[in-house]
Image (cartoon, rainbow, N blue to C red):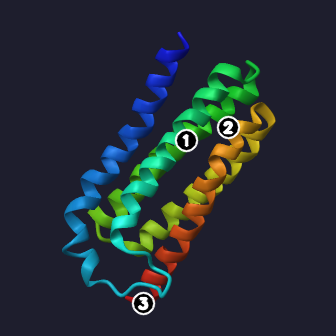
Amino acid sequence: MKIISLAFSLILAYSAAFIGTFFTAPAIDTWYATLMRPALNPPDWIFAPVWTILYACMAVAAWRVFERGERGPKRSFALFLYGVQLVLNALWSVVFFGLKDPSSSLIVILLLLVHIAAITYFFFKLDRTAAWLFVPYLAWVSFATYLNIGIVFLN
């Protein structure tokens, strides 16, 4: 049964990734290439491997909380927040790359950042390993928020 819940968790996380990629990939060499970006902007090729690892960490963290976390309202709430952040994660790509709207995507990424911080906090109470698996995601989205702010102000 644990392998089924792990597979489901991976499918759920990578579904958000697929939605994001669907909107991101066509815009990278066209619209995104025309934007002025902040000084610390990494090369475009780094994003795909980083996100691939982060989605795996997210999925394993959620799976651990589902399988190992104490059953009850705390676990249910933490997993609900996890689902909301997956939606926000995909929505950011839709708004930023699909709609080509960095200003509106800034609102989405700030909401995402708050959700990731909350999830990390709640996961810590349920499974510390799961919480630590979310820390790189929190750091990366904090950096992505800086990039988003920079793009808003530079363009």
Give residue 66's quadrant in the image: top right
Q: Is residue 105 above or below residue 85?
A: below
Quick one: label 3, few (<14), some, or many (20+) residues within 10 Å? few
Compared with residue 4, is residue 38 higher up or lower down, i.e. above or below?
below
Q: Position of residue 39 (x, y in %)?
A: 48, 88
Q: Quadrant of residue 62?
A: top right
Q: Name the front one of labels 3 and 1.
A: 1
Name of the residue lying farthest toward the right: 125
Report the amino acid beneath label 2: Ala
Q: Secondary structure at mark 3?
A: helix
Label 2 near label 3: C-beta < 8 Å? no
User: What residue do we see at 25% from left, 69% from top?
Assistant: 28
Please name the residue that numbered disc 2 is placed on. 130
In front: mark 3 or mark 2? 2
Considering the numbered disc 1 on the image, is that residue within a helix, a strand or a loop? helix
Specify the amino acid type for callout 1.
Met
Which sits earlier in the primary sequence, circle 1 or circle 2?
1
**Residue 121 picture location, percent across and down:** 75, 46
Q: Nearer the viewer, residue 136 or 106?
A: 136
Residue drawn at x 67%, y 35% as measured from the top left = 78
Residue for badge 1: 58
Please rate how many residues cluster around mark 2, counting C-alpha atoms within 10 Å: few if below 14, some from 14 to 19, many from 20: many
Quarter that holds the C terminus: bottom left
* Numbered tag placed on residue 154 in the rendering: 3
Q: Residue at x 77, y 31 (%)?
A: 126
Badge 1 crowding class, 10 Å Cα cut-off, few under 14, some 14 to 19, many 20 or more, is many
Q: Residue at x 48, y 29 (%)?
A: 9
Quarter residue 93 falls in: bottom left
